[in-house]
Amino acid sequence: MLLMYLSTLDSPQDQSWFTDLYNTHKKLMYYIAYNILGDEQMAENIVHDAFLAILEKKEKFFLNDRHKTKGLIDIIVRRQAINELTRRKRMEYREEFPDIPDPRQSVEQQVVSGDAHDRMVALIRGLDENYRSVLMLQYVYQYTPKETAEFLELSEATVRQRLHRAKQKLKKMLGEEVVKNE
């Protein structure tokens, strides 16, 4: 695995730095991820993702202070492990409680509601990927704007703006559909 990471670095100095960082911190990173997730495979995936994140932001890690480097690595691994755990719990919840009809609705209302849901899904699929991904993360996976921003590597303001624009586009599309059906 180390060779794969080293292949992304240009200079021998960078490769030497990363080899030292990898050998020094890989066990600690795995330990942190495993303690949070309790699953070996998921912990290994988190460590891999953390090393990729370190490579993307390697300038922040060219520090002479090993304690700061260790602290940054600890934050990256913990954040990624907690995000993964949160994602897994949300998915388990969704699988455990699929679309349960509201018992207060009549069968006719449930059918109409299901049809409206299907139309809305079709409209969302017609949106640009930037808008669709924000809507899905916010409403399907119930991410907070902050989590959505981190996941998509955007600012929170951009996420809010895209969400607002996506809603406007959906309203316009719904209005056009109503006019077309009249």
Image (cartoon, rainbow, N blue to C red):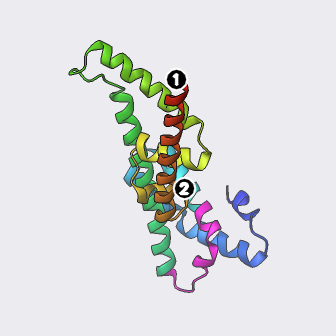
Q: Can residue 30 be seen in this view?
A: no
The span picked out in magenta is 52-66
Q: Tell me the number on the disc at residue 181.
A: 1
Lateral position of residue 84 relative to residue 21, left or right: left
| Identity of the residue drawn at 61% across and 71% down | 57
Q: In which quarter of the image is the N terminus?
A: bottom right
Q: Mark 2 points at which residue?
A: 152
Residue 144 covered by magenta stretch: no
Residue 63 covered by magenta stretch: yes
**Circle 2 crowding by C-alpha within 10 Å: few under 14, some 14–19, many from 20:** some
Which three-letter amino acid code belongs to the residue tagged 2? Leu
Nearest the viewer among 86 and 113 is 113
Q: What is the total number of numbered labels drawn onto the structure image?
A: 2
**Residue 160 rendering spot, x and y as whole percentages:** 46, 58
Q: Is mark 2 on a helix, strand or loop?
A: helix
The answer to whether mark 1 and mark 2 are in CB contact below 8 A is no
